[in-house]
Structure formats: C-alpha cells, structure tokens
Image: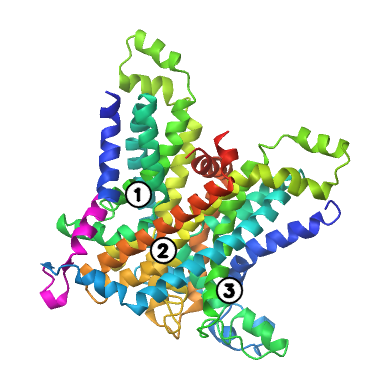
Amino acid sequence: MNRSRPLWIALLLIWSLLPMLWQLITSLTSSDALVNADIPFQQRWTLAHYRELLSGDPPFWRYLFNSSLVGGLSTLLTLLLAVPAAYGIARMAPASRRTIRTVVGAAALFPYVLLFLALLELAREFQMGNNLLAIALPYAGLALPLALLLLISAFEGLPNELDDAARLEGLGVVDRLRWVLMPLIAPATASTGILVFLFAWNEYPIALTWLSRDDLLTLPVAMARIAGSSIYAVPYGAYAAATVLGSLPLLVLVLLCQRQIVAGLTNGAVKG
Amino acid sequence: MNGLLALPALLLMALVFGWPMLRYSWLSMHASSVLTGLEPVSNQGANWIRLLEDARFWQDAVQTLRFAALSVGLEIVLALAMALLLDQRWRGRGVVRALSLLPWALPTTMMALGWRWIFNTPYGPLEQMAQSAGLSPLNLLSNPDWTWLATVMADVWKTTPFITLLLLAGLQTIPDDLYSAFRLEGGKTRQALTAITLPLLTPYILIGILFRTAQAAGVFDLIQVLTGGGPAGSTESIAQYAYLNAMRFLDFGYSATVMLAGFVLLSLVIFTAAVLLQISGLLRPLKS
C-alpha cells in the first residue's frame, strides 16, 4: 500500500478533478474548435465565451448575486430559528427530546423534491413567487432538520451548570444565549451555517418553480435553462465558462471552510 | 419556556414538510387538472386506480430503484477505498481531502451539464477516445439500454465524497491499538481489513446507505439536466414524472398521487431494509 500510495492519490485527484478541468479547457476553446478536431492547436483558444457571458442580458454576475443573496438570507433565517430552538429542545425532558429528534431525523432523510407542488401552491396563494427574499422561507424550512440535529448535539455537549450559573447571575434567556452559550457553540454554528448556505446555493426544484423572471434566477436554474434551451445545440463553450465562474466562489468556500464542512457533514449524519 | 423557543422552528418545519403530505393526501382523492378547469373535484380514488395501471409510473419506479441501488452500491465501495487512503498519514492529505470534496459542493445542475458535454456524441472526450481506439460510437446519451449507466456515473462522481467523509469519521474512531494487537497476534495487514476495519465500520456504512438511498430515490436535478428523462423515457425518475404531471400536463391530482406513491415505495424499501438488518444483527454495534 505504501509504495503504491502516490498512484492511488493521483487516481483520486484525477477522478475528482478531471471533469472540472475538462470544463475549464472547454471554456477556453473556441466554438469552432469544439466541433472540429483538425483546427491547429494555436488557433483553438479564446476568451470569447467569458466575454459573451459577462455581457449577456442579464449579465452572468447577476445570477451569482442572486444566489449569494438567497444563500446568505436563508442561512441567516435558518440560524435565527434553529439556535434558540435547539437550545430549547436540548433542555427538554429526555422523552420529548427523543421524540423530536426522531421526527427531525426523518425529515432530514425526506427526499424534499416531493414537496415542490404543495410549496408552489403556497407561493401562489401568498404571492411569494419571483421574490428572492420570500424564497428564503422554504429554504430555511428545508434546511432546519439538519441545522437542528447539529445544534441540538452541540447544546447537549455543554454542561447544564453553565446555564444555571448564568441564570443565577440574573441573565435572561436571550442574554444567556447571546453572551454565554453562543460563543461556546460557535464551531457548530459555523458548520451549520456553511452547510445551509451550500444547500441554498445549490437548490434546484424549489427555485425552478418559484422563480421565473430572467433577472431573478439563481445559478442552478440559470444553468439548467441553458440546457433546456435546445436539446441539440447546447452552447457548451459558454456553458463551460459559466461553470467555471460559478464554481469559483464554491472553490474558495470549500478550501477555506473544509474543516467546518467535514465536521458538519459527519456530525449531522452520525449523531442524527 | 423551552417549548416556546422551539415553536417557530417546529412550526415552519410542520408547514414545509407536514402540510404538503396532508395536501397531497387530499389532492390524490380529487381530479384537479385542465379537464376540471384546475378546480378540485372529488373522484373516489380514480387517481390511485389509474396509478396501479400506469405502466409509465411502474417503469419509472423500477428505474428509480435500480438507479438508487447501483449508485449507492458503487459509492460505498469507492468511498471505502477513498476513506482508507485518506485515513493514512501523508503530506498534503488535507488539501487532497478538500479537493476531493469539490464534486459534492458544486450545484448538481451545473455539473450535470458538464457531464452532458463529456458524454456528448460525437464531440465529447469519451467518444473521441472511443473513436481513436477504433470503437464504434458509444452513443452514451441516446441508447435506452445504456444511458441510465451514464446517470449513475455522474451521480457516483458527485456524491461519493459525502460517504467518504462519513466513513473517514468512522475510521478515525477505531483505535490504533487494535491494529497493533492484531499484528502482535500474528495477523496480516490485509486480514485486518475484514477482521477489524469492516466490522467496526459497519454502522457508518449503514448510515451512509440510508442517507444516500433516501436522496437517490428522490433524484431529480441530475436526470432533468443530463438526459431530461430520455432516451425514450428510459432514465425518467418518479420525482420527474410527478414534476411533468404537475408542470407540463397540469394534472395536479395525479401528480400528488404519484408523489405520495413514491414516498410510500421509498418508505417500504427503507422499512424492509431495516427489518432485514435487524434480523441479520448487523445493527447491533450501533446500539452499544
């Protein structure tokens, strides 16, 4: 194993990265060269796909902005609801705690795409379609099970005496949470926040049904719309350029926050 | 007081997860389509009878199940290999782990279209390679017998990192002492895998299977973009059929029926699996 290890590492990297590198290469290849292998090497390269993307209508950065807005808002809303709730649940009697955990765990497993129709009806009923602020509401609801599982575990890991001591000092529940407990569960909160952000950034079926105006699309829907524009002539060059630009924020996020992501994913699955 | 703190979150969850189930139960007993002017009219279970006779639904159910079974199976094997590699100590392990996580982090629709380009006939790299090897065209996305394997491959690429992380966490709970003791007793390194690693990892493998099966059973984004359910409906999933019924055929009553049926089927699969595991005793380590 030791001697062949570099080989295995190389295979792992090739498997993980090659499809993405192929997108990068495609994004820099001229449309002619994509369908004609005989064009000489020096004449194959171009930045035209990126220029086209950034000068499109709406320009590409608009989707990045929409996705960031929805992601940020959903994360904020989820944490705002989940942190106090997890604290409350963690301090309940063991029996009710177990019941809630079971229900929340089942919801975390639920293939949420099946919910889209009823949620779309709600969006129509309350006129929440085509509204980037409103879509944070179902996103928070969908992300809550995972967030609760992670945060309940975190609160359960804190000694009760700490909370009791703060109560004796005369701190109300908001102050206790804000000044005593929140700093202690900051790592779990960070993990949760990043996972919720990734979920909202990548979510497709709800965004597909709630958002239809061109300038309000999130990244996944904008991407899929290019795919649906024509079965036969998908503009692969421009599309690959979009993939590259759309991946950059995530690349940075994953490299910077990999510790939190890893902790969140494993705790969410194992402790839930 | 504690209940009050939890109330807003639990209410929102009830609205987002609970309400749709109630609503679908009601809708599935009604005709609500263009034929009824989109107004719900009670139809005494006609949706359910139609579902039982709907060959397309059952074909989609079989397709969804075989997609889930093969994807999750391959992912477990691949993830185990990756986790064993990443569990060892070597320089640059952190960076490699982060890079191997990337496929999981990217939006599914984004890389689904990337895969569509990779599988493209005749310009995609796979076809080009087949061509230079002198093979006949693979037609990966237009052959009803083979296209579902292309969707499996894209799914395996995308979601293996999730299971890898899970198994990695499991591996890190196994104390090194166990392996030293095993070697002192004269065990071979290779045997340690089946004697120590796999038995202790079983609970983690099962959690991975559970999570991924549930997700794969609801597959939508990937297939919608990669194949659109084609060719000839061969890759269409239950979720996609429900989506088509609602958004294209505007038949909300039947769409709700399809979704409820999909949910029931998934629950049955998970329940059966849980019972089988219970009988086989594989779950015992989880409880201790």
Q: Are marks 1 and 3 on the same chain?
A: yes
Q: Tell me the magenta residue range.
A: B19-39
Residue topped by disc 3: A28
- Residue under the point 33% across and 60% down: A114
Residue A142's label in the rendered image is: 1
Q: Marks 2/3: CA distance?
A: 22 Å
Q: Position of residue B224 (x, y in %)?
A: 41, 72
User: Is residue B26 located in the magenta-colored stretch of the structure?
Assistant: yes
The amino acid type, in three-letter code, at marker 3 is Leu
Q: Is residue A208 above or below residue B276?
A: below
Q: Position of residue A126 (x, y in %)?
A: 16, 54
Residue topped by disc 2: A220
Whichever of labels 1 and 3 marks the residue nearer the N terminus, that label is 3
User: Is residue B221 located in the magenta-colored stretch of the structure?
Assistant: no
Q: Is residue A44 above or below residue A173?
A: below
State the residue lying farthest toward the top: A168
